[in-house]
Amino acid sequence: MPDRKILTDISSKSWEHPADRAALNALRALPMFDEVVRKVMGFFGDVGVRQLFLANAVLVGPNQRPGLNELYEEVLATMNCPTHPELYVKQSPEAHAMAVGFDTPFVVINSGTLELLNREEQRFLLAHEVGHIMSGHVVYRTLAEILLLVGLSGLPVLAGLALLPIQVALFEWYRKSELSADRAGLLGSQSRDDTLGAFLKLAGGANQGDKISLEEFMKQASTYETQTGARETIMKVLNTVFRTHPFHTVRAGELQRWIESGAYDKVLAGEYAKRSDASTERPLNQDFADAADYYGAQTRDAMSKVGAVFDRAKGAFDDAFKGGQR
């Protein structure tokens, strides 16, 4: 592999997706959301989170999985991460990794992920999780992970609160935060094919002695995105509303568009926001404006078709009702 560029002093603003920040600001504006966060943090704390997620995991270090530790150290150096989050490996066949914690975030990667992905694909995934930490995602992602793991009924501290709107908005932001972290993962990997190849394996598994094609997978991703009929649009919403992650085809397509926009190459050329430069902070209304452009470009035509479906359904209902009156 060629030498990777060290992204000295890089700010997370350099990779954050506009829909991520807008969705997070909308989530924070929900009534009672701050109280939910406060109660869950107070109930678990950092000690409780570590017990919840690390009861059966192994801390990676120079003498424990030294090869993975070396890879992780390279990722932290490439991203110029200002902290050194701990890395744990958890025994689980599920291909998954996460960054969790309140005051002191850490990264957990499942053993099934290490079996599925090669070293360079693992590099992308580790950089993805480091991106979450550097973007300040971890408190709210930990809240979502706890809701998934423990369930609403398992959190008596939240009794009496109307949680469904918060849960829906939290998962909407969670999915959008993945798009930001995917960009961070690509910047840590600096290999387009290894990054997109990770999505291919996460979607369909290892090759198991057969041939798998990244080119065909990207064609599939394009096909999914161009299905904007009314029925397809409604099913996409229903299929994802309670998911924490976008579909892997969607993530691959989003990342390919970011590459084609030229933004990725600019970052590698040194044109990126710096943590030391306060002027890189974006105004909130700009986040919403950019997100509106993004959502508009993605959904405007599709939603007009959805409206037409509802109009036809209403017309059919009216006709049937009139028929019954005869």
Image (cartoon, rainbow, N blue to C red):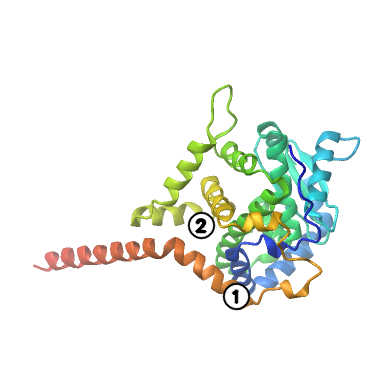
> Position of 318 compared to 254: left or right?
left
Where is residue 211 drawn, in percent x and y?
A: 54, 26
- Mark 2 sits on what residue? 241
The disc at residue 286 is 1
Foreground pick, 141 / 117: 117
Locate residue 113 relative to residue 64 in the image: left or right.
left
Outermost left residue: 326
Crowd rating for badge 2 (residues with CA inside 10 Å; few <14, some 14–19, many 20+)? some
Characterize the local packing of mark 1: few (<14), some (14-19) or many (20 or more) Cα atoms within 10 angstroms.
few
Task: Measuring from the top left, give residue 114's x and y in whole percent.
Answer: 71, 35
Could you tell me which residue is drawn at 79 percent across and 50 percent down? 78
Asked which secondary structure carries label 1, the reply is: helix
Front position in the image: 38 or 140: 140
Q: Amino acid at mark 2?
A: Val
* Whether residue 6 can be seen here: yes
- Under mark 1, the amino acid is Gln
Question: SS at mark 2?
Answer: loop
